[in-house]
Amino acid sequence: MKKRSFISGAAAIFAALLFAGAALAAGKQPAAASATQQKGQPAAGQQGRPADFSYPRIVHPTRVGKPLDIPDIGGYRVLKCDFHNHTLLSADGLVSPMNRITEGIETGLDALAITDHFGYVRSAAIPEATEAKFFERARAIAAANHFTFIMGSELNATTKAWPIIHANALFLKDKNDIRDMYDLIAKDQSNVDTPQKAYDVFVEQIRMAKAKGAFTELNHPWFMQPGDKFAITPTLKRLFDEKLFDGIEIVNASIREQVDNDAFALCLEKGLTIIGNTDCHDLIFTYLNNFHIAHRGMTLVFARENSAAAIREALDAGRTIAVSNFKFYGRPDNIEMLVRGTIVAQVDPAANLLSLRNLSGLPYRLDVVLPDGYVKPEWVQLDAHGVVSVRLERLDNAAGAFAGSVTLVVRNAFVAPDKNFSMTVN
Ligand SMILES: [Zn+2]
Ligand SMILES: [Zn+2]
């Protein structure tokens, strides 16, 4: 039944596309499209939009999977953000800044940071005037779509010696912020002949980024480290001791699907902000295909509104959850806010029934823990916007109303390394 309606739905969309294509070929504007455009036209001078509204609003964030709609929770919007993306302004990046923003919108994000490399992998092939134009257009696409663009840069210890250190500086005001740091590296470049000197320059960069008001995030701390394991080197210790990192990227979905549990534990211990990103270098759709995953890595941010300032406030307060392939990692209070804000669970003792309703586009996998003497149910898949009922049956088949409590263990939500979030249903 479900399948049949999907097929007929797909056929209807296909027919609509054919009709739209035919109308366009005939030089006509399809009626539905023009209606959408009229609806999307901003009032003159509307806040957050450029005066010359020349960029189309992108209305179908559904090219991969479903949009992950999440209701507002506790007075916050739950924003989907990716704070680590490269463009062709990194020598190893393949897409334009405009395309990165468009992809962000199409994959259902609310905000995205462009964090091109500095120093040894910065692309020298793009003239400055072209770069400025790229970012001007990227900002215009973001503004036209109520999407938040965040300027950043990925800083690095400029050395081929291991272990590498990479960190993002986010919320840079403009290109000149980056230029100052680039000058700092360039000035010291001739002296960077030992790994230690490179690390010293890196520490200087991070200090400068902090002095400029950037939010600093240690990136993929396990990557290219001995044994692929996050270890606190003397340089990292200096940075942590000086409190120069605000957060750690515990999920980097381009490098591996799994969370880094050492980084997760350190965030919890030191009160650092928990971040999940893609670190995308090629097309997002290539990345999604390569990794066979349903959705991009991201950070859920509990923010008062969708703006750079509100996102920054939330990051500083640590109201984040890192997401990798529908697994959620965060501080216990943030995970609890997400789960209780998206799952409605109720016990009807007289009917011996537990009912579960998912208010969001996020899928959950749950263990239902019942008192002794009750049939233990299998784990429950609570799909996006799904409704599931679980019968509360006694092993001895005795009659009577359910007595006791029900505990839900959320298998894909983690409040500490390998520790699932659980809650009692009243
Ligand atoms: Zn990196
Ligand atoms: Zn990167």
Image (cartoon, rainbow, N blue to C red):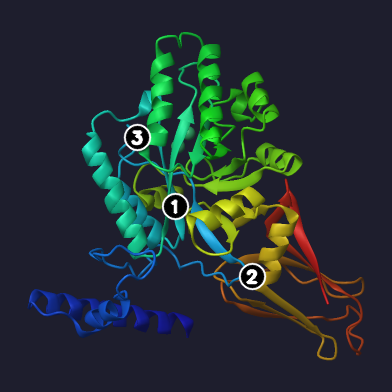
In front of the other: 111 or 69:
111
| Vertical comparison of 203 with 87: above or below | above
For residue 90, the mark is 3
| Vertical comparison of 27 with 290: above or below | below
Q: Residues within 10 Å of mark 1 (few under 14, many from 20)?
A: many
Residue drawn at x 61%, y 55% is 327
In front of the other: 341 or 216:
216
Q: Which residue is mark 1?
A: 112
Q: Amino acid at mark 1?
A: Leu
Image marks 3 and 2: residues in contact by CB distance under 8 Å: no
Q: Residues within 10 Å of mark 2 (few under 14, many from 20)?
A: few
Q: Amino acid at mark 2?
A: Gly
Q: Earlier in the sequence, mark 3 or mark 2?
A: 2
Q: What distance separates the C-alpha of mark 3 from that of mark 2?
A: 38 Å
Q: Which residue is mark 2?
A: 75
Q: What distance separates the C-alpha of mark 3 from that of mark 1?
A: 16 Å
Percent position of residue 223, x then y: 54, 31
Q: What distance separates the C-alpha of mark 2 from that of mark 1?
A: 22 Å
Report the side of 156 relative to 347 (left or right). Answer: left
Quarter assignment of residue 399: bottom right
SS state under label 3: loop
Residue drawn at x 73%, y 77% is 345
SS state under label 1: strand
In front of the other: 65 or 118:
118
| Vertical comparison of 163 with 391: above or below | above
In front of the other: 140 or 2:
140
Percent position of residue 354, x then y: 76, 81
Q: Residue furthest left?
A: 26
Report the side of 279 relative to 128 (left or right). Answer: right
For residue 20, the mark is none
Q: Is mark 3 within 8 Å of ligand 2?
A: yes
